Every structure is written in structure tokens, then in C-alpha cells.
Image: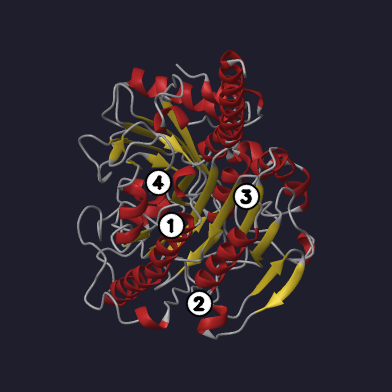
Amino acid sequence: MADPRRGKEAAGCLLLLLAVLTCSLRCGESLKSSNIVLILTDDLDVELGGLTPLKKTKALIGDAGVTFSNAYTATPLCCPSRSSILSGKYPHNHMVRNNSLSGNCSSKAWQTGPESQAFPIYLSKKLYQTFYGGKYLNQYGSKEAGGVTYVPPGWDQWHALVGNSQYYNYTLSVNGKAEVHGDNYEKDYLTDLILNRSLAFLDERSPQHPFFIMLSPPAPHSPWTAAPQYQKSFGDVKAPRDGSFNKSGKDKHWLLRQPLNPMANSSIDYLDNAFRKRWQTLLSVDDMVERLVKKLEDIKELNNTYIFFTSDNGYHTGQFSLPIDKRQLYEFDIRLPLLVRGPGIQPKQTLQNPVMNIDLPMTILDIAGVNVSTLNMDGQSFLPQLVPSARNGTSRPYFLVEYTGEGHLPTDPYCPKLGPGLANCFPNCICEDAFNNTYACVRTFKDYNLQYCEFADNEAFVEVYNLTADPHQLENIVKKVDPALLQTMNQRLIKLQSCEAKSCRDLK
């Protein structure tokens, strides 16, 4: 007769074995890091209603997580800003000054310096499967920068645009090989193409390791080519007429004093057309977000994926009588949209603590399990703001925005009266940039909602704005502010302009 105690022992051992196996499986699942998606649009403002056409994006990312109301770029121009996102550094540390090779955009110096320590390299070391699709840096793929065969380190799948934003008739570097595209919507429309390739990447990836996808569509950058189905959308939409629209910049830096005011009707027609077309291109981005979220849901990865949606800089259409561009120090050019959803993030939150684009790589690497305190980056992780249970975080009391002006030595042949040293003089010879449009600003939210800016010009020009009393920055109050406060802001600016890594974060 069998001993009943042995039966109970055997059953107990079996239950213990099952428990160990179950625990092992669950532990394996929990040890897999979260997936990450970063969608980086091109020239998408938030101040002028740039998120309005993106209804699905706001619902699927913003409403499902966090909307940051005070997100800023370190510099309001494509290549320097994107270099900040990749490196986590202020421009004075990554040394990319503008969109040209001579300005260090995708140059050999960039490649052997900051790019060799960019955040995708750390993700690769953490066994992330990485995918890049779309615009990279404005000079990427040029012969002097290594051509299309050069693939930056850290990327497993590389589908990068050669040069600046285009929607059709462009060349891609596909894992180091040139791929020429035409003007067939189904085959070539860049926003759709990079989405489709990212979906194929998701199908082909290994489920054992996490993934990182970075999508950088051309929208809403010029030439503002909408998909065929959206070319008649927003037919009655015009650029917003409130705030600083068509106002004089009489108390501002000389570049803001030169536009014709009020603007010519031809300039207003031009900027209205640009505004409408920008919104049209964004409808394809909205579709991109919807299809990507649906795919993540279908493959059961949505609940384990952080999705970031942002831009490289803001934009203006008629503010202070400047027709269209970015580059300026004002909120419309330096504020960014930033929406985030992901594991542990409560839905429908709006956070007001200031964050910057230099914080994106630190936050992404924090999610990936990298010890970010060891990184030589200027930003700081805002993961504690996204997931407060993670650990305590600190909000920066103030931060730096800096820009190096760009001009051309030859006089613009279309604007011979203007002389040399200017750039982007369109339409109607209204110039958006100049060599001495070089400035550095302190933006603070703690104690004062204030912006203090100094120009590197022969006037030593200073602009100061109280954003609480004057959110549209209509009045430069430099002559009305307590000199002691001006001195304090000047001292902060000096400190920030020479900061590096930890000293950019340890501020009082």
C-alpha cells in the first residue's frame, strides 16, 4: 500500500516546480526593457495651433498620457536642434551652429565627436533593435560628409533622407546604399514610406529584445507637399491674426525692426498659403501615428511601449511682421509640442514643469535602464515626471536657449539694397536672419516667468520679457526692470553659456 505522505510530498514538489517555472517566465518578461518610439516632426509649432490638425495624435498619445505645456528647444533651427536631441548637449557643446557643413551640420567633426556618443549607441549596447526613418541632419549624405554610405553608429535599420526635407523626388540612404525615389504617391511619399518600413521592421524584429523606432517625417516643413487626398483640406484656414501677428518689432533687435509694417498683402497671402499647406501635410503624420499605434496594439506591444511626439523647433507666420521661418528667440519659435504615453503614465495629464529637447536622450536612456548619471550630456531625465513612482526628480529653475546667426557675404541679387551679411530674405526682401542675429537667452519659470536675452552685436542689445504680463512678448522691458534682476539674469546666462554636463543641471 502506497504511503499517502509520499503522494502529498510529490504533489507539493510538483506545485513548487510549477511555481518556479511560472516565476521564471514572469521574471523574464519583466526584465525585458520597454520599447520606445520617438516621432520627430520638422518645424511643427505649438504656439500657433500646430497641433490642431493632429486630432488622432492628440487622442492616441496626449490623451493617453502626458502633454507638456512648457517644452523648449535649445536652439530654434533644424540641424543644431536635431544635434541636441541626438547628443543631449547644448549647441555650445556639440558645436553645430547652423544647417551648413561649415556650420558643422553632419560634418566630419560632428561624426567623430558628439555623434560617436549619441544616444542610439547606448541603446544598441542595451540590445535594443533600432530603426531610423526620415530626415536626419540637413547635410547628411553630402559628399563632404561621407556620402550615403556613411551610417551613424547605433542603428540596425537605416532609412535616412539625403539632405533637407522633401516629400517626393529624393534619395534615401538605405543601410548605406542609395535609393532614388520619384513622385509616385503609393511608392514615394516620404511620410508614408518611412511608416511602412517601420511596420515591416516590427514584423521582422526579434520579440526577445526591445526596440527603438525614430520616425522623422518631413511635415510640416517646406515644400509643404500634401498627400493627394488632403490637398483640398483646410481651404478656409488662415494664419492666426492675434498676439504679435503683423505687429511692429520697434523695441527689438534691429533684425525685427526691418520688416515692413503693416505687411504687404502679398506677404500675407504667401504666409496664409504656407500655413494652410503646413496643416495639410500634417494629416499624413496623423495617419502615421494612428497606424503605428494600431500595429503596436496588434502585436501586443502597445502597453510596453513609450511613444514620444515632438518637433525640432517652432515656427512663425507673420509674427512681428516676419512672414515665415523660425530662428528667433520668441516663444513661437522656441516652444515645442511634446506628448508622451507609455507604461506607468496616467492618462490626460498636463505637466507645466519646463523640459527641453536635450532631455529627450537622457529620458529615453533612463527608460532603457542606462545609468544616466554617468553620461556626458547636458540634459536631465524627465522620467520621474512621467512616472512619479519611479523616484524623485527635480525641475530645472532656468535654462538656456542659444542661436548663432547665419548670413551670406554676397548681396542677395533679388534684394540689392540690403547689402551683405543677411539670409532668408523672402518674400518681399524681408530677412529672417543675419550674421549678428546671434543671441543667448535665459528662460526662467521659478520666481519669475521671465526671458532675458543678450545679442552678440555692436549694440550689445538686450531684450527682456515678462511672460506673465505679456505672453506675446510685445514689450521689451529692459529699461523698466530692476537693475539687480538684470544682473542676476546676466550672471545666470554667463554660467549657462559655459556649462557642460552636470554643471548644466546643478543650478540654483
| Residue 442 visible in the current orientation | yes
The first of marks 1 and 3 along the sequence is: 3
The first of marks 2 and 1 along the sequence is: 1
Where disc 2 sits, the SS reads loop
Where disc 4 sits, the SS reads strand
Foreground mark, 1 or 3, reads 3
Q: Is residue 53 left or right of residue 503?
A: left
Q: Residue at x 54, y 58 (%)?
A: 215
| Residue linked to disc 4 | 338
The CA span between labels 4 and 2 is: 38 Å
The CA span between labels 1 and 3 is: 17 Å
Where disc 1 sits, the SS reads helix
How far from the left and from the top, in percent, is residue 462?
40, 36
Q: Are marks 4 and 2 in contact (CB under 8 Å)?
A: no
| Residue linked to disc 2 | 414
**Amino acid at pointer 1:** Val
Foreground mark, 3 or 2, reads 3
